[in-house]
Every structure is written in C-alpha cells, then in structure tokens.
Image (cartoon, rainbow, N blue to C red):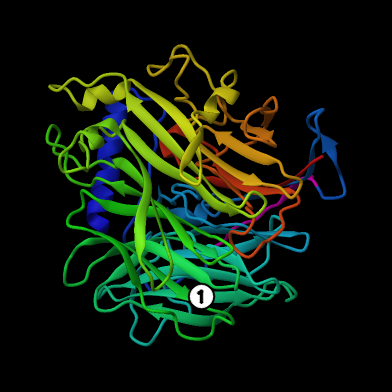
Amino acid sequence: MQDAAGVRRRGRQRALSAFGIWAREVHRRSRGAGRTMRAGYLLLLCVVSIGLAAISRTVHAEGLVEEMKLEAAGAAANTSYLLDGKLQPSIPIGWAVMSPMIVVIGDDQYAPIFAPCDPANPGLYCVEILRNGVTFSEPLDMGHAFAPDGFQAELAYHPPLLFTDGTRLLVAYWARAKDHRSIIQLLSLDPKASVPARWTLLSRFENQGDELLSYLGGAMGPAGEIVIAGYGTGGPARSQRLEITKILPPYTGPWMPKQLIAEYPSPAYAPEYPHVAIRDDGSISILTVLANYTPCSESELTYSVYKNVIAFEGQYAGSFVARWSDATPDTVTDPANHGDSCLFGADRYPLAHFWDRQSRAIYSMVRSADLDEVDATHKVASNVRFSRTFKLYRDGNLIVPDLAVYFSQYFADPEHPCYSPQSACHIHAMTMTRLDNGAFVIFANARDDDAASTYSKIGVIWSKDLQTFSEPVYLPTSYGPGYGIFVAQPDKNGMHSVGKLQFFNAGNTYNPAQLNYNQRLTMWRYSLE
C-alpha cells in the first residue's frame, strides 16, 4: 500500500511540473522503519507572540476582532532534520484533511504539531500537543509509545484526531508494524497537569491479521461515544473498504467490532479521507471520497485522482446507505463508475462535514474541479485547463453552488493557465464552522508553491443565512497559509459550544527547492461581534 502511494504522489508531481500547473498539490507519503528516537528531535517551539489574549485588534469594521495569534517554529525548521547532510522531508500538517484536529477546553486551544521522530525513519512520526501555541505535552512517539509486546513499528505518519470529554483531551491515531499488524490507540492528557503533560493510554483497538484502518476521521456523539471511520485494506479479500469502529465512555473498555460500510474490489475505488458527523439521535453520516489509484494508460504512472464524494448514512450495528454523491463527469459516464485515472485535474474532494444543532442539519463542503475539454490523445495534458468551484450542501442538498465567488478579487490571476471568471483555481482548500451567535464562517486559502509571497493571506467570510455574505476579510500570514485551515466546529469532537473562531494553520518558508520542509504553525482566536 505504502510503496504504491509513494509512486502515485511522485507521478502526479512530475505531471503537474511538466505541464506548468502552478496550483501544485503535492501530497507526500513516506515509508520507513526504526525504533529509536534521536536526541535531535526538537520542535523548537520558539513562540513569537504577535497578539496575546489580552490584546484585541479590530480587523474589520463589521466585528472580526483578533484575540490571539501565536506563531511557533515547526518541527522541520531546524537542523535535526538533516540526514547525511541532506534535508529530509516532513509531511506538512494539512497535507490531507484529517478531522477533527483542534480542541478548545475552557479558554485554551489545543492542536498537534508533528514530524519524524528520527529523520532516518520518515514513516514514523512524533507528536506534541500545543496549548495556545506553547508546548503542553511530552513528545509522543506514535509508533512505539504504549505499543503492545512484539510490535515492531513501521508506519505511523498521519496526524492524530483530537476529542474532549469536557475534562480531558483525548487523542487517537493508528500505527502499523513491520509484520503488518496494526492498531488504533486512544490516549488522554489532563489539561490541569504540569507541563510537559504526561500521556495516559486509555484503550487500544487491534485489527485482525494484516488488516489496516488508516486515513482516520471521527466524531463524538451525544452520549460521548467516539466513532472513527477509516480506509480499510488487507485481510483475506484484499478489498478496499470503508469501515467504522466505536468506543463508549469512559473509553477504557473494549472497542466495538469494526462495521463494514462499503466495499470495493480494486484500488480504482479507494475510500479515503472520511469525515464523520453524528446527529443528536445518534445516527451517523460519513463523507468520503473514492480515489482511483490505477495507473494512467497514457503515462503508466499512478496519480492521486479523487473522483467521487459519497455520503453514507445509518446507525452503528445497523444498515448504512449511500445517501448522496458528487462525481466528476468522467466518473458518471464510466460504466465501471471509477473515472479516468489520467484525468487527475477533474476531481472531487471532501473538505468539511459536521452536524449543526442550531439548524438541525449536516453541512458538507466539497471541492469540485472540471476540465475545460479533454483531448483523447493527450489526456494528461488536458489537466492544464480546468474550472474549480467549492460547493456547500445542507443534508445533501446543494445550497451554495460556489463559495469561491465571494473571494474572487483576491484569488485571481489572469495570467494563470486555468484562469476564467468562473474558476477559483487559486483557492485550493476551504473549511467552515458555525458560531454560537448563528454566524456561519468560511475560510479559504491557496497552496501555491510560493504562497508566502503570492497568496499569503487567509480569506474569511461569514453569513447568518448562507444567502447573503459579508465582504471578505484577508488575514495576513508570515509563512503562507499552508495546506489548509483547521477550525473548531460545534458538536464535532465534544465541544457543544463554539463562541469564538478557534483555528490553526501550518505554513512554511516556501524555499522553492525544498517545498514543505520548514513548517510554521500559527494558532489563532477571533471573536465575531
């Protein structure tokens, strides 16, 4: 699985570079093994206080007020990531959407920062939890900490999921051993503990045989239950599966058996990046994307090709059905329903999915890109010109065809190959939340190679009715917005009240020769009055 992943990431990078697509989306995956954590593992969280909680600055006349902005040097910003004199890559935070990743307990904001424990083993990551931009926890070696006897770690490189039961910070992540044995671990931190806070293992889920559950997404339900969805591989069938598991408070008991939601025969249908939303009645909604990881017939390379976003709904231990979907035109017309793996510019990608108690509805955000035209003899080259929109759904019904139009003045470049008045090709990611005052808030950002000097600002708009929107506000960043914005959402991971905008991003120095090496984490808090 991981070797193939590395090939498809590199394949896409080559193709995008060859055809001059500036909006390059490089998703790095690494593989490796190792059992030691070097003393050189230093996060060097040199916090630069730009606006502490005691200082408020009005950013916009309509009431967006900055209360906190803290920048911390990222884990890959120092020389400990030199191996034999060469920089080693660090998967950037936000390279994919793992949700949820931010928790607020009281007035304090918690978020993870992570990087390889040892540059010689880039598939094994260490995590630290930051509180208001400052190191709070001990480093956690995800491949080795609290591992069961005989577990020789090989992979643990996805960022963890964060939850809270109101008194504790709960952290979940997966790890795989060299013999393909794999686990999900749930740990806790006490917010009242002295710094650095020590980790406590609450429970462990162990897959059978060589089965793996990765690309995790999760949510906490009304009774405090945690439901985690993931991309299931391995096992006797060697199929591609969307599966879920569940654990109840106080989280020390056994996990419930995995439940199969959907199963597919080949990597042409890989259900990745699931988002989970749980309604007040306990019913579950899962938004995932089917990626096509079969080689392109034209180039014989394997690209990252996201073709069909699907929402599954049902009850744990009950039946699930595919409630709605949003697929590319080549997927819709394909008899096999997986689309053309050469047309990676035509894609669909899930960005947000959460239950909103105020309106008693689930809101979903999907990035949508369609090619201007397809040359059947030069399919890869056809990916150069495309139109991109950002759709907003409520309970599966499209309510805003394109959120990008509200940011059109800033994210526009007539010289770009994909430019057209209808295309948001310089917006690569969005997310959203809803505040206690009823305002929906939408964030937009670019991922260009040199976003620190081009589209370095984060766009923000808000609306009470999702029909009329504020004028956009653009928040400056020192190192670019990074791959995405992670924002606290109501009723997602144990937080039932979201009174303020609590979010973080991970930009970098954007050295053109070393893209994604030097992360910089920024934690923000704003009020909207």
Query: In this view, which residue lies farthest toward the top?
Result: 414
**Under tag 1, what secondary structure?**
strand
The residue that mark 1 highlights is 186
512 relative position to 278: left or right: left
Q: Where is residue 180 in the image (x, y as percent from the top left)?
A: 26, 73
* Magenta span main SS: loop
The residue segment tinted magenta is 40-51
Residue occupying the point 44% across, 53% down:
82
Q: Where is residue 482 in the image (x, y as percent from the top left)?
A: 53, 40
Relative to residue 398, is residue 107 depicted above or below? below
Query: In this view, which residue lies farthest toward the right?
Result: 54
The magenta stretch spans residue 46: yes
Q: Where is residue 435 in the image (x, y as percent from the top left)?
A: 71, 47
370 relative position to 378: left or right: right
The magenta stretch spans residue 50: yes
Q: Which amino acid does label 1 sit on?
A: Leu
Relative to residue 57, is residue 86 depicted above or below? below
Q: Nearer the viewer, residue 60 or 37?
A: 60
Residue occupying the point 52% across, 32% down:
446
Q: Nearer the viewer, residue 527 or 2?
A: 527
Badge 1 density bin: few <14, some 14–19, many ≥20, Cα 10 Å:
many
Q: Position of residue 518 (x, y in %)?
A: 52, 45
Residue occupying the point 51% across, 51% down:
76
Q: Is residue 146 visible?
A: no
